[in-house]
Amino acid sequence: MGKARVKVPKKAKKGEIITIKTLIKHKMQRATKDKKTGKPIKRNIIHTFEAKFNGKPFLTAEWDTGISANPYTAFTHRVSESGEYEFVWKDDAGQTYTAKARIEVA
Amino acid sequence: MFGTRYRMGGVAFTALGALAVAGVFTLGAGSASACEECKGKFEVDGKKSGYLYSNPSTQAMEDDDFDNPGMLWVEKGRKLWAKKDGKANKSCQDCHGAPEKMRGVYPVYPKYDPKTKKLINIEQRINRCRTEKMQAKPWKWDKDNLLGVTALIGYVSRGLPVNVKIDGPAKPFFEKGKAFYYQRRGQLDMACKHCHEDNAGKYIRADFISEGRGGGNFPTYRLKWQKLGSLHRRFKGCNKQVRAKPYKQGADEYVNLELFVKWRTNGLPVEVPGVRR
Amino acid sequence: MSKTRIEVLDRREFLVASGAAVATLTALTSGALAREMKDANKLLQELTGGAKPTEGKVKLEMPEIAENGATVPVKISVDSPMTDKDYCESVTIIAPKNPTVYVATFKFTPDSGKAWVSTRMRLAQTQEVWALAKMSDGSFRIAKTNVKVTIGGCGG
């Protein structure tokens, strides 16, 4: 499904510090046992999140099982030029999710 | 925030029937809280939405369309709306147009369905379209697809007052739903009304009891579920809590109850997707 | 165990009972409870390399009462100029009474503009949550806050 949502302002002034919000649909499954069958359920969490601007990472996060399902993260960035943001989430199952957004500096 | 909270511990819950009802509810120091502006929106004619029984941090999660995790399902619903499916190779959009055209639908369901001669709710209406018009398989209750499109249909009616009709052919079903609401059930021998009418605004152990006016916010993102869920799933939870055998989502009993609960919500605004604890 | 209760036990029962009580106490201090604390402290030590973090400059905002431990909003901000020479490198969230005490680390760069992050975390029970900030000069700062996690009466 359309998993990730990101909110980035379309325009900013040079040097402005903007707020970026991100949300992704993910169970953040802890290692546990199935309540009914008793079969083990493998851990599958997003363990790494990275925010890049024009290819350069400016925020990286390492998560464990204590981050809630459907992880929400908001953070800031000092905008120096027009360009493209790329957000990357990686989970235990080897899946990579990405989202992109553009910003114009007036 | 809510001031001191009193815990009754497990004892009250192991006591049966009327004893439990008498002993388990405690008066909180606070009352439903929110900013004045929100109060006007979520309190109509003395009826309060469950929103006003939530913590400010939970309210804030619902208020902002980006912070609201339920919007992930609304967006999924939007994609499904335009997706062709079934042997007829049709999408919802092919017949109905843009999702926004469905504004006004959510507040009036469930309603009487002449075809089956009983009530039909939104989830069932979506599945009827799927099986009859699209010749596709019905979606399962409380799975992402059905939640997504149901949430989308609720979302486009945001702000409209809930407005179900209970007269005419819907009347006998409304009466059944009402009877269900006042019927004691389960090992604890409690009816819906014991919590949501007699004891709203008090605490049951650590939970602040709402008025049970959930007709405008489901499907709701519950923090406990860590996902979106249907009103019928919530009914099941309530029934289990009084140790009664729950019905299945979509059972006639629950659709009738849905009409009654939605009637209790009449006048309050649609807030789908709601966020609750 | 109350005094009165002991008096009505015969000697053998008393020995068994007190033995069990001692065993329970030992289990609690060297087992689960202590391990919870030791893990968080050990983790802290590992992260700081033994340096003692000081309080102040880190703001950790969480609700006093979490309606459900599965989703608890958390905001962290660190007072820092965020220049190439002087910035906050990272913040780590630690929940000493969670099954896994390490929750997350957010690594900043001067481009971040602010050392600020807002997220949602899980809390297994009522506890004090820690936010540890690592500054570019190698010093550490810490903030702690108590969050009550309510056990609902009608989980549903």
Image (tube, coloured by chain):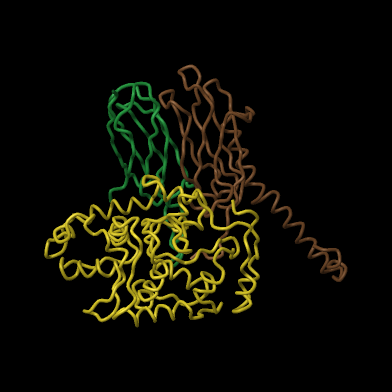
Q: Is residue A2 above or below residue B262?
A: above
Q: Is residue A34 above or below residue C69?
A: below
Total numbered labels: 0
| Viewer-proximal residue among C114 and B145 | C114
Q: Residue at x 31, y 33 (%)?
A: A86
Which tint is chain B? yellow
| Viewer-proximal residue among A29 and B262 | B262
Q: Which residue is drawn at 27% across and 70% down?
A: B124
Chain letter for the green colouring in the rendering: A
Q: In this view, does A52 lie above or below C8?
A: above
The residue at the far front in this view is: B45
The residue at the far left in this view is: B88
Q: Which residue is drawn at 23% across and 54% down?
A: B100
Q: Position of residue A20 (x, y in %)?
A: 38, 35
The residue at the far top in this view is: C85
Q: In this view, does B69 lie above or below C108?
A: below
Q: In this view, does B146 lie to the left or right of C118?
A: left
| Viewer-proximal residue among B131 and B261 | B261
Q: Position of residue B214 (x, y in %)?
A: 42, 64
Q: Residue at x 45, y 18 (%)?
A: C84
Q: Is residue B147 left or right of residue B211?
A: left
Q: Position of residue B83 (x, y in %)?
A: 18, 55
Which tint is chain C? brown
